[in-house]
Amino acid sequence: MTPTPAPTLAREAPPGGPRWTDVCAYADLLPERGACAIVGGVQVAVFRTHDGALYALSNLDPFSGAQVISRGLLGTRGDAATVASPMYKQVFALETGVCLDDPAVSLRVFPVRRTAAGDRVEVGTSDEHRE
Amino acid sequence: MNDEGHAVRDVVIVGHGPAGHRLVEALRERDPDRVLRVTVVGEETRPAYDRVALTSYLTEDADLACAPHDADVTLVTGDPVVALDRAARTVRTAAGRAIGYDALVLATGSAPFVPPVAGHDLPGVFAYRTLDDLDALRAHCTNLTMSRPGANGVVIGGGLLGLEAARALQGLGVRTHVVEIAPWLMPRQLDEGGGAMLRRHIEALGMTVHAGTPMAGLEAGEDGAVARVALADGGAVEAGVVVFSAGIRPRDELARAAGLPVGERGGVAVDAGCRTADPDVYAVGECACVDGQVHGLVAPCFSMAEVVADALLARAAGRASGARFEGADASTKLKLMGVDVASFGDPFAGARDGHLDVTYTDPVAGVYKRLVVSDDARTLVGGVLVGDAAAYPTLRALLGAELPGSPEQTLFGGTEAASGGDLPDATVICSCNNVCAGTIRTAVRDEGLTDLAAVKNCTRAGSTCGSCVPLVKNLLDAELTAAGVQVSRALCEHFEHSRAELFDIVRVRGITTFTRLIEEHGRGRGCDICKPVVASILASLGNGHILAGEQAALQDTNDHFLANIQKNGTYSVVPRIPGGEITPERLIVIGEVARDFGLYTKITGGQRIDLFGARVEQLPDIWRRLVEAGFESGHAYGKSLRTVKSCVGSTWCRYGVQDSVAMAIRLELRYRGLRAPHKLKSAVSGCARECAEAQGKDFGIIATEQGWNLYLAGNGGMRPRHADLFATDLTDEDLVRYIDRFLMFYIRTADRLQRTASWLENLDGGLDYLREVIVEDRLGLCAELDAAMARHVAAYSDEWRDTLDDPEKLGRFVSFVNAPGTPDPSIVFEPERDQIKPVLVAGTRLEVAAR
């Protein structure tokens, strides 16, 4: 297995702090692939890239209306890490959720982190994310 | 005051919609010294936003704001102009501002038309025009669906905007009905056949259409809000929300009050220079009436803004402007959840004008196409496309020009050819921004542009609706080729190589991982283009199970789940049925599996059975049952051999001369699992009657009294091609040997997603050269090709059986990593013809490319 960096801290925690939910073991995530977690009724696509970094985006593909973003192929465009929707292939930046093929569209970004022990993955939600 | 008017310094623009915004931008771009002082006064509280994309604000929270103007432009928002004093050359706003002008431009847009029926002003009734309308609509629908899940909503008006509103309403969770007074949908753009086909698509999306039915009035419920829409035919639809989209009316009230002439049906009357009867007052966009005509699409509104920008700059410079608004191309293309709709030129021209119609309807595929051509069938006058609008950019560019072939060829793919190079300079390529072929060519040549993004930036072509982008790319490539610039064959930004070059690199250097390949021969970390290509190359060269190790991360979702993704995120399952021969016992197993898992069942064109609607976590259970009964993966999900179809052959058929079923089974079992640049299809016919349709396949075999005739490089699909006769009267052994070599040579040398047909068309020397390579071994390659195929045959193993035996691979087949047993609640079905059909419950996107 590829060595992975130390646990990363949450990016951009919303004000008041997110509520953290344990979703899976870090080892459950294949490098360069995603998985879907359901958190408070919301489907969150969680990705692990080749360098061990974690990202979490809304699983809902706005172009097809299907919950499939977690099944997209990862990659890069320029310096940006990306995921391509498996349905109609639009590419989204993992960091910001912005659709690089149509910047008017973006996916919601969720905070995601490894636990201090490094073996578990947690997704952060705030109340606005709940259905 | 001379005819050109007095000198101009202060320009005041009334209205900050897309037309007003474009006018300001055009003025600033062409006035670097800031000779003109520009003031814009808008009624809405927000600066201009992209109204074309309005629906995406609701469905995806899109930010629609137009680019802000520079700091020298004075922008007043939320304060409508209420009076125009032409004598004093001053406008006055509701808040009491008085603003003087040298030249005034009315860009007040239009207002939604709400018919004066009973109940039109009840709570719960909305227009669909501004972001404020949408905010109010969303708030109402949120309350409605919370208090009454499953509530109905009605959109009055089945035109372009009405359908957009309908989709937005459905996205807000409301069961949506569309009421259209005309007998079919989108009556301004579509003819009856196109409207009927569109209706089938709209209904398939779960909406109800009432066409040919005027609305009689709205009725309130107990709470005082709208509750029912009464129809003129006596029917009624329950409705907790009603959206009016029954047309627009130009906002000409300022001009009327100031005594300026207006058109017969409204709109500020202007000449071709967009100037009103007062030489200091202009009008642009939806509020203007040019030659008695009001324009509602964005392209003509932009053209008017450009005309007025030119006129104002000319006046400031003391010269005359030659810019004229020359009418508009009303061509339209929109995409409604995968349904393409396009209308171009004059789609209603018919026999009365001496024109001819060519119509094609495919109710199964949901495609309707109609071309209107001149009486000698040579000139394109107009047309309608529903369900498949791929030909739209080319057809629109051909309007008024001579067709390159017969109308049928134009309808069926003949237009796909890289036609950019031949179009005359004057042909309008981008009608949103009025850019013609000559402008693009000049920009490429003079500015030294080499990529599409630069061409879009420089010329604006393709930057609004995007439908002309393929043509712009063709023009760019043709111009670069003519200039001797090598057109890049790079696979994507990560590899400079073509697929064939990468294949050789991987083969010769013995590379077995993507990581090594991209580190040594590429850059970045790959993408959805190069990863599946490399996955396919690795699989073609025999690197074990496609989900083993790092390869798993390269597979697109179909290969990753060994099934075919469908529009709602479920998958379909196709077990292999070699040659289409199946025992009753196995047929029963398929039936039982489909019944037990509640799958939709359909017979495919390749003599197999497709089972739809499986969730990822069901796939292993489904396949355990199928594998137990002796089935294998059918590879319907892979770029690989699909089926070898057959007729029943000499065993049963009184005309058959060879056993086509046995040969089909032999070939299908030999090539099953073979990964290729694209899917591969085959068929074997037992006699010259050709019941298996072998000549439409990548490799097709037709029996003769003496043996087999081999046909190569045919296909059906978008651009059908008959296969070429490669060799005749072959023995079984020669037949198999030639097919082995053909396939391996194709796999080594074809481009990404290039089927055998286009590969052969692009092969230097064509069929004769292919015979030299395969039969005469001119390249000395045959031994290697034969050995590669022998390795494939020996290494074949059923992907599904192997997956079921491997707990690690099986662990990935879950909808939710944190709730493996939980099915995805977004997957919902409803019954249709005694089976299931998918219902999309999530918000969906509507793209309106131009209007």
Image (cartoon, rainbow, N blue to C red):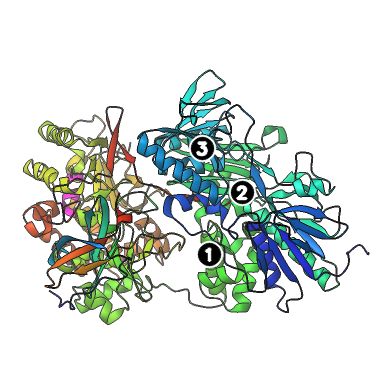
Residue found at x 33% / y 46%: B567
Q: Amino acid at mark 2?
A: Ser
Q: Quadrant of the N terminus of chain B?
A: bottom right
Neighbours of disc 1 within 10 Å: few (<14), some (14-19), many (20+): some
Q: Position of residue A127 (x, y in %)?
A: 30, 55
Query: Which disc is residue B194 wearing?
Result: none
Left or right: residue B102 compared with residue B593: right
Question: What secondary structure characterizes most of the magenta part?
Answer: helix
Image mark for residue B331:
2
Horizontal side, residue B308 vs residue B384: left or right: right
Q: Which residues are magenta?
A: B664-672
Judged from the image, the secondary structure of the residue bearing numbered disc 1 is: helix
**Front position in the image: B507 or B446:** B446
Q: Earlier in the sequence, mark 3 or mark 1?
A: 3
Residue at image mark 3: B360
- Is residue B123 within the magenta segment? no
Of the two numbered discs 3 and 2 in the rendering, the one whose residue sits closer to the viewer: 2
On the question of residue B539 being in view, the answer is no
Type of the residue with mark 1: Asn
Position in image of residue B542 (x %, y %): 16, 65
Q: Which quadrant of the structure image shows residue B693? A: top left
Q: Which mark is residue B474?
A: 1
Residue type highlighted by circle 3? Tyr
Give the chain of mark 3: B
Q: Earlier in the sequence, mark 3 or mark 2?
A: 2
Locate residue B425: give its quadrant. bottom right
For marks 2 and 1, the one nearer the N-term is 2
Q: Chain of mark 2?
A: B
Q: Secondary structure at mark 3?
A: strand
Q: Position of residue A20 (x, y in %)?
A: 21, 62
C-alpha span from label 3 to label 2 = 20 Å
